[in-house]
Image (tube, rainbow, N blue to C red):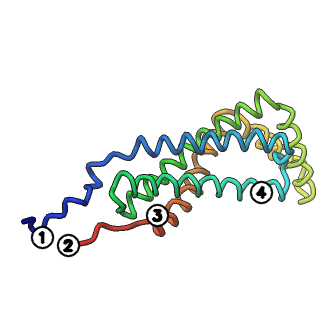
Amino acid sequence: MANFDENTDIIEQADTPFIGLALKYGLIGGLIVTAWTLLSGVLGLNEASTTSAIVGTLVGLGIYAGVVYTAIKKHRDEDLGGHISLGRAFLLGLISCIVTGLIGGLAAFVYYNFIDPAAIDQIVESTAEMMEGFGLPEEQLEEAIQGARDGFGFGKLMMNSGIGAAIMGGIVSIITAAIMKKEVPMV
């Protein structure tokens, strides 16, 4: 007869690795972001405009949410027997998003610097026109234009992608983790 204090169906979370899964889903997310980068270039959605920014943000949120949800669900249901803590779910989602963002930054660097370098000029020109509308002095306008152009370098793109992924991914991960967590019942 089994002792009531023993629950053999509960899998110990600390003994179950998740970094490989986070990297796997981050890679999948990165490939989706890469496809989006190429598609947005073809569709002309990589311009500096309010509409492009809104569409890009919504698509990015959708990609992050899909990656985080899928990774947490798989880990919770298949690896941990249906239970996952808030912290573990958050960390799994955050790592997946950061990997997704870094791969997306690399894809953007390759796209803008090798596939369609003319897009940089179009974006910088659109940015300059928008800033001229704000009435910036010529000196500040030139600094802003140079800053926009410098933003397409490898270091800047990777840093901005990593920071953006950590912020957006952190928000998406904590919300998704809070919804999907399922603590092990206390027996």
* Label 4 SS: helix
Name the residue rendered at 89%, 41% in the picture.
122
* Label 3 SS: helix
What residue is pinned by disc 1? 4
Q: Quadrant of residue 152?
A: top right
Q: Quadrant of residue 53?
A: bottom right
Identify residue type, mark 1. Phe
N-terminal of the pair, mark 1 or mark 2, is: 1
Q: Residue furthest left?
A: 1
Q: Is residue 116 left or right of residue 109?
A: right
Of tags 1 and 2, the one toward the viewer is: 1
- Please tell me the numbered disc located at residue 177: 3
What residue is pinned by disc 2? 187
Cα distance between the residues tagged 4 and 3: 25 Å
N-terminal of the pair, mark 3 or mark 2, is: 3
N-terminal of the pair, mark 4 or mark 2, is: 4
